[in-house]
Amino acid sequence: MFEKILFATTASPTCDDAARVAFELSKKNKSRLSVFHVYGIPTRGFSTFVRDIRTGDIEEPDENYKSLVVEEMKQTYAKFLPTYDGIDLQAVTGEPATEILRKARKDDVNMIIMGAHARADDVGASRHRAIAGSTMQRVAKAARCPVLIVSRPCVTCWSYFANIVVGVDFSKASDSAFQFALNVAKEIGCKLHVFHCMDLSVDPAINPPSQAEVEARLAKAKQKMQDKYIAKMGDFDNYTADIWEGTPYVEILKFARENKADLIVLAHHTREVDPEQAELGSTVEQVVLRSACPVCSVNHPDKVDVSPYGVRPAGEQE
C-alpha cells in the first residue's frame, strides 16, 4: 500500500519498536524504505563542527565521521538488513525535524515512521506535554503524509492487524483520517472501528448539560456519523460505529483497549485551521503517550487516497 516509507531514527534503542514496524511493513509491502538519521546539529552559525544529538560530543562532520555513523546504523539494524534489499541508509547533519521533512518532501514518501521521543525513559501516563518529542510534534504538524508514531512494542505487524480504531470528530481533518483508516482496513482486510467521543469534560460542574441536551447531542452525532462516514463505506461491511461520552483521549484509549486495537488513527488536529499552523492536538498527544499500539497522525489529505502500492487511481491529481 505504501511505495515509499521514511523511517526517521536516532539509531538508538529508543527507536527499536518503531524500527521493527518500519522494516516489517516495508518488507511485506515491497516498499522502498529510507532509514534516515540526523546525527548532529551545527554548534553555531557556519561552524564546521556539530554536536552529536546522541552523545552530546562536539564532532567534525567530515566524510570519515559520516561513514562511521552509517556503519553504526548498519550494525544497529543488522538483523533486519539481510531480510529485504529495498533499504537505503542515510545520515545527515542539521536540525532533525527540518531534515526529516525535507527528506520526506524530496522523496515524496507515503508514510513517515518514528518514535514518540528520543528519551530513554519509559513513556508513561504521568508524562507532561513538554515531554512528547519536539521533533515528533514538528514532523506531525508539517508532514504531507501520514505519520506513524510507535512508542511501545507492536505485537502484531501491519499486515496482520485485525482491528483499526479511527477517532473522528466530524471535522475536515477527521475526514482525511477516516479515509486513510478505511483504505488501510480494505487493503489489509481487517475490521474498522469508527469512534466518536462526545466531549462532556468542559466545566461539567459549573454548567452540566441536562439529560435532554445530552440526548439531543447524541442524536445529532449519530446522524453525522451516518452521513459523513458510514455512507462512504460502500461495499465494505467489516466495521462498527460507536459514540461514547466523556474525555476524548480517555475514551479513545478505553475503546481501543476493549476492541484489541492494533492501530489507532487520529487527525493531527481537530480545529478548522490550516494544518501547517495547527499544534499537535492534545488528544493525539495524550493517546500517543499512553497507547499500547501504534498511533497514526494524519495531517493533510494528500497521501490518504492511495490505491495499493502508493499509486493514485487514474484521473486523480496530486
Image (cartoon, helix red, strand yellow):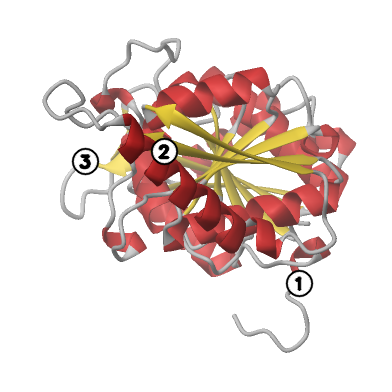
Can the viewer see residue 16 in this picture? no
Mark number displayed over residue 311: 1
Identify the secondary structure beneath mark 2.
helix
The spot of residue 272 in percent (x, y) is 31, 62
Q: Residue at x 30, y 23 (%)?
A: 131
Q: Earlier in the sequence, mark 1 or mark 2?
A: 2
- Report the residue that reaches farthest toward the bottom: 315
Q: Which quarter of the rendering shows the N terminus?
A: bottom right
Q: CA distance from mark 1 to mark 2?
A: 43 Å
Identify the secondary structure beneath mark 3.
loop
**Towards the viewer: 187 or 133:** 187
Q: Would residue 268 appear left or right of 81 to someone viewing this image?
A: left
The spot of residue 36 in percent (x, y) is 56, 45
The spot of residue 282 in percent (x, y) is 32, 36
> Pointer 2: what residue?
215
Q: Residue type at mark 3?
A: Thr
Instruction: Check disc 2: other Cα within 10 Å, few if <14, some if 14-19, many if 20+.
Output: few
Instruction: Between label 3 and label 1, give the one nearer the viewer.
Output: 1
